[in-house]
Image (tube, coloured by chain):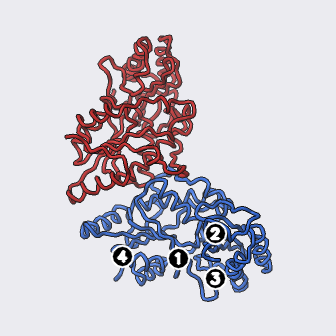
Chain colours: A blue, B red
Amino acid sequence: MTPRIVRRIAELREEVAGYRRQQPEAARVGLIPTMGYLHEGHASLIRRSAQENGLTVLSIFVNPLQFGPNEDYNRYPRDEGRDIALASASGANVVFIPTEEEMYPEPIRTTVSVSGLTDRLCGASRPGHFDGVATIVSKLFHIVLPDHAYFGLKDAQQVAVVARMTRDLNLPIDIVPCMTVREIDGLALSSRNIYLNHEERSQALVLSQSLSQVPGWIEDGMTEAELVVRIRGKIRSQPLADIEYAEVLTFPDLTQPSADRPLRDSKEPLLVALAVRFGKTRLIDNVLLFPSEVK
Amino acid sequence: MTPRIVRRIAELREEVAGYRRQQPEAARVGLIPTMGYLHEGHASLIRRSAQENGLTVLSIFVNPLQFGPNEDYNRYPRDEGRDIALASASGANVVFIPTEEEMYPEPIRTTVSVSGLTDRLCGASRPGHFDGVATIVSKLFHIVLPDHAYFGLKDAQQVAVVARMTRDLNLPIDIVPCMTVREIDGLALSSRNIYLNHEERSQALVLSQSLSQVPGWIEDGMTEAELVVRIRGKIRSQPLADIEYAEVLTFPDLTQPSADRPLRDSKEPLLVALAVRFGKTRLIDNVLLFPSEVK
């Protein structure tokens, strides 16, 4: 069924309220917040929401607040027709595509920020980025008031930030983290992959290839320091790769594990996260591990 | 009817959801967030909510986040029995009295802040105060999801901050500002008035007395600079009065009006706000004016 295309906040609220009135006891609303230019990763979130909810709302909004001054806000890829087709095929009931004027009718003065989780990884290289994310997600949560919200784990730090904000502020919403979807050769899906030329794309496979070795390295008894040296060495074997960060942190609290103890002894889940530039394109990827299950 | 006393977030959500299920079309929930030690000002908010809503929730929580290190968090007055009696007499249906552990089960990392409105008046002398207010109000809003929330205009800056946060973050809640309630001799009601000794209380009347002259002064053509000089002089006539601020700002944007034009020409409402210490006790008071109506 073709989803309803909604561009106004008031109209979206009416859609959600209308659905809830029809299903007073059993209403379940799922939200997938996106910046559009959808790929199979987004499609998997939509399909999961469609399974778990009676109404699935997909939002598409390239949020200027979360882009830095030298980032790709203006050239961020947009293709509304294609997005609507993919949303429709995946089972979205409503696609919310607001204008910037609709989301920011006056300069916004309110900021939602999550300390501690946002000063490392992407937060360190993109100052203000996660304030922008937390603020727009908080707006979308208030507009839709979903029961569930779906986020891809490729943006693992974003999942940690949104989950913490939701808990700290008592938002009555379940945050559902979903597995990263990859191309058949391992490249993590991203709207930014279209920026890559042939050679860059080929060298970018080093991200997933090195991450796939992490469970074995941890099983062998590597410490945090050893693992970081090993993974950086492997990525550097690709001449176009320019490493922004390669880190091992606990998840979801994003604290440093002890540097000199084997990671396999960690009591908490571990996140091994990479941000690497290939030419002008910044890619991120990660693997999330539960060491007790690795052994 | 005796209100239900609720100490758990989950239980409060169940109370509100149960009421909404009973009134699927006509449910209206009002929230009055307070720090307790209720007085007739709070009672007037509760009565107004009881008139306008089918369910009125009063929350009582002395929020540590909004107190500075040298402020009166520990000695802030508390009297649960008296508060419940007053809530009951005024028409509250539910009184929510959470513990600190219930509101902050782990150290909170998320902060909601409103820039611009919070760097002057009480925000200048109480750094972080309005972040604490915006954050706890946002938590209470998410817990109750009221249709209306009631705030007294004695805390005019708080009203401006909460209203702006609500608008910026698309919270589906009407903020209802309510008139300051005064003693028969003019003293604005405040939980902190009990700190005043006889002499301090007597001299504190200078606040309401000087504010009551403001409409006449504005009608006479005073500029902002003239009005500030006049009101400071009047307050200083009381030897115990120690002025923290005496300011004229537009409302609700809290910008400075032109210093050398008569205030009566202002296109925007004006707030004349005072913070004055008497002994150890800091009192605030204000008057809100619509110059076009004064003339």
**Residue type, mark 2 in image:** Leu
**Residue type, mark 3 in image:** Leu
* Residue bearing the label numbered 3: A187
Q: Chain of mark 1?
A: A
- Specify whether residue A288 is in view: no
Tag 1, which secondary structure? loop
Q: Is residue A140 left or right of residue B38?
A: right
* Residue bearing the label numbered 1: A37
Q: Same chain for marks 2 and 3? A: yes
The image quadrant where one finds the N terminus of chain A is bottom left
Q: Is residue B195 above or below residue A27?
A: above
Q: Is residue B158 left or right of residue B128?
A: left
**Where residue A93 is drawn, which disc sits there?**
4
**Residue type, mark 4 in image:** Asn
Q: Give the Cα separation between the discs numbered 2 and 3.
A: 18 Å
Tag 3, which secondary structure? loop
* Residue bearing the label numbered 2: A271
Front-most of residues B10 and B203: B10
Reading the chain from its start, which is encountered first: label 3 or label 4?
4
**Number of the front mark, 1 or 2:** 2
Total number of numbered discs in the rendering: 4
